[in-house]
Image (cartoon, rainbow, N blue to C red):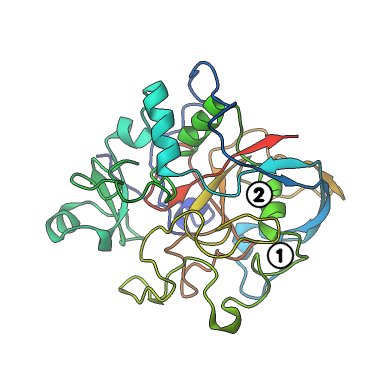
């Protein structure tokens, strides 16, 4: 396993719960996987109406270095988005049809949250400095999410994890779909609400009701599981937002199509923005089951982070989009 090193403070992959691989991403394009399977296996999709919305946020507890602001008008054409993150069952169908090997399999390892591991493996696995709750586990990949001996037999409807941006793009290409742009993702996640903190409003637990899968308790030593889950939840857990989309806050980080930037164009309004033309880091949105207000409150709708296209962790997945 290659040694994990700490990046600069401006690199989003070192400011949240998804450490990066140290290797350079080789390409922005997935391998050619042949004929798409779009006609029968992509599931239901939700039409997100076109129009203008306010992107970004100015929350008092926002993270300025992440480029959450400024709040800016964005105009989008209508598009379709999956109501759910891609599941283990769906990804297994892709692998069975194509023989695809994920980046985690090619590298031979991926990052697993330390508390999910048995004692010996937890003690022996290397950890990145700065985020010691992650262990680099040999043999961890989407079908063995906690490493050798683990499986997803009882997690068919949980989001697939340990998928890199390149893996997500490859699945989309096979399915005749694509990853959403960051602007599309945020517009859809807001569910038609205007500048609310969460997909359902401004209060995290309205009426004491948990509305997303995030860390409960003291991170990273004690999770009360008050929301019902320690790791991933089924993709249809909790109530959907106003557009009928599930888990756009918490559960797993979701890859977007865009390269990462904090330099947002001054042109107003932005029309169907798709980010910089190139870069080294791809955008991720939504937060995960490991997010907690004490260190990573990126489960707010405006929050964002990123990682290199070949990186994979046990809390990163994706959902698919397509044009109208």
Q: Which image quarter holds the N terminus?
A: top left
Q: Is residue 59 at all visible to an observer of this figure?
A: yes
Q: Residue furthest left?
A: 120
Instruction: Report the disc number at residue 237.
Output: none
**How far apart, in angstroms, are the residues tagged by discs 1 and 2?**
14 Å
Q: Residue furthest bottom?
A: 207
Looking at the image, is mark 1 or mark 2 earlier in the sequence?
1
Quadrant of the rendered image containing residue 304: bottom right
Q: Position of residue 98 (x, y in %)?
A: 41, 22
Q: Nearer the viewer, mark 1 or mark 2?
A: 2
In the displayed structure image, the side of residue 312 where residue 168 appears, left or right: right
Between residue 280 and residue 298, name the one nearer to us.
Answer: 298
Q: Residues within 10 Å of mark 1 (few under 14, many from 20)?
A: many
**Residue visible at 54% across and 83% down in the picture:** 208
Q: Position of residue 236 (x, y in %)?
A: 51, 56
In the displayed structure image, the side of residue 123 where residue 85 appears, left or right: right
Between residue 320 and residue 271, name the one nearer to us.
Answer: 320
Q: Name the residue that disc number 2 marks.
A: 185
Quadrant of the rendered image containing residue 226: bottom left
- SS for tag 2? helix
Q: Which image quarter holds the C terminus?
A: top right
Q: Name the residue that disc number 1 marks.
A: 57
Between residue 40 and residue 303, name the one nearer to us.
Answer: 40
- SS for tag 1? loop
Between residue 284 and residue 251, name the one nearer to us.
Answer: 251
Q: Residue furthest front?
A: 40
């Amino acid at each position: 396993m290659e040694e994990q090193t700490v990046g600069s403070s401006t690199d989003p992959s070192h400011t949240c719960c998804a450490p990066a691989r140290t290797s350079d991403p080789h390409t922005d394009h997935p391998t050619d996987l042949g004929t798409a399977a779009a006609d029968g296996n992509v599931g239901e999709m939700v039409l997100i109406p076109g129009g203008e919305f306010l992107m970004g946020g100015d929350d008092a507890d926002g993270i300025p270095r992440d480029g959450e602001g400024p709040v800016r008008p964005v105009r989008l054409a209508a598009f379709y988005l999956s109501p759910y993150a891609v599941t283990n069952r769906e990804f297994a169908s892709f692998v069975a049809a194509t023989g695809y090997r994920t980046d985690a399999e090619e590298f031979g390892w991926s990052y697993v949250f330390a508390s999910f591991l048995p004692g010996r493996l937890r003690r022996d696995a290397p950890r990145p400095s700065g985020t010691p709750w992650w262990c680099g586990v040999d043999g961890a990949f989407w079908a063995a999410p906690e490493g050798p001996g683990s499986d997803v037999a009882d997690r068919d409807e949980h989001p697939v994890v340990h998928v890199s941006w390149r893996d997500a793009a490859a699945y989309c290409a096979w399915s005749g779909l694509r990853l959403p742009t960051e602007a599309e993702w945020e517009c859809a996640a807001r569910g038609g609400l205007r500048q609310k903190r969460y997909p359902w409003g401004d209060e995290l637990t309205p009426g004491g009701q948990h509305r997303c899968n995030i860390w409960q308790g003291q991170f990273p030593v004690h999770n009360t599981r008050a929301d019902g889950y320690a790791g991933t939840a089924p993709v249809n857990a909790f109530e959907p937002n106003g557009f009928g989309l599930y888990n756009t806050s918490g559960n797993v980080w979701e890859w977007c199509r865009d390269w990462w930037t904090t330099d947002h164009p001054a042109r107003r309004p932005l029309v169907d923005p798709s980010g910089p033309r190139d870069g080294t880091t791809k955008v991720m949105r939504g937060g995960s089951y490991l997010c907690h207000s004490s260190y990573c409150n990126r489960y707010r709708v405006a929050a964002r982070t990123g990682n290199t296209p070949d990186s994979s962790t046990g809390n990163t997945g994706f959902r698919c989009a397509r044009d109208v």
